[in-house]
Amino acid sequence: MATVEKMPMLAEGYERLNADVRHLKTVERPAIIDAIEEARAHGDLSENAEYHAAKERQGQIEAQIADIDDRLSRAMVIDPTTLSGDKVVFGATVHLLDENDKKVKYQIVGETEADAKVGRISYNSPLGRALIGRNVGDEVEFSAPSGDRYFEIEKLEFI
C-alpha cells in the first residue's frame, strides 16, 4: 500500500492555498461554465473555437483544483513560533554569513511558499537540504547553479 507523503507548510501558505482553491471554485469555475454555455449557443461545436478554448480552460481549472486539494489534504501545518533549539528545522529563520562575510537571512518553508527574493527557501532546495539538521556555528557547503557556495550559520530564529 502506498503511503501519503505529508507536505510541511506554514499556516499562511495553507491559507493562501485555501484562498486559491476557493477562488477557482467560486469564481473561475462558474465563469468558465457560463463561457461554455455561451459558446454552445453559437451552434456547430465541431468548428466552434470559443467552445474548444472554454473546454480546454475548464480542464486546466479542474486540474488546478485537484492539485491544490491534494496539497491541502497532505498539508502538515507547522507554526515556527512553537519551535526552539539550535538546530535548523522547517520554519526556522537562518542568519548566514557567506564566504565574503556578507550577511543573508532565509526562512525554511514549503515548496509552494518559497520565494528567494523575499528570503524564503524551500526545504527541498539545495541550500534548504544543506541547512536542515545543522547547528549554529556549522559551516555549510552546497552546489548552486553558479557553483559551490559556502555559508556559516550565525543565528537561528523561530518567528
Image (cartoon, grey):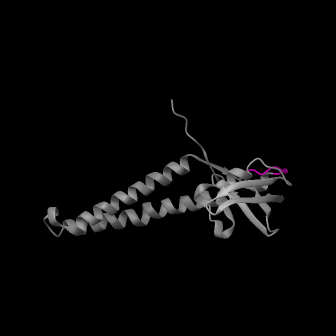
Percent of width and height locating residue 141: 74, 54
What kind of secondary structure does the magenta stretch mostly adopt? loop
**Dividing the image into 4 quarters, which one contains the C terminus?**
bottom right
Percent of width and height locating residue 20: 51, 62
Q: Does the magenta stretch include residue 86?
A: yes
Q: Is residue 19 left or right of residue 128?
A: left
Q: Is residue 87 magenta?
A: yes
Q: Which residue is drawn at 78% across and 56% down?
A: 81
In this view, the residue in front, 89 or 103, is: 103
Percent of width and height locating residue 60: 37, 59
Q: Residue at x 14, y 67 (%)?
A: 43
In this view, the residue in front, 142 or 119, is: 142
Q: Is residue 136 left or right of residue 93?
A: right
Residue 52 appears in the rendering: yes
Q: Spot the residue most to the front.
A: 147
Q: Is residue 151 left or right of residue 114?
A: right
Q: What stretch is highlighted in magenta?
A: 84-89
Q: Spot the residue most to the top.
A: 1
Percent of width and height locating residue 80: 75, 55
Q: Residue at x 57, y 62 (%)?
A: 16
Q: Total marks drawn?
A: 0
Residue 155 appears in the rendering: no
Q: Which image quarter: residue 150?
A: bottom right
Q: Which image quarter: residue 15?
A: bottom right
Q: Spot the residue most to the left.
A: 44
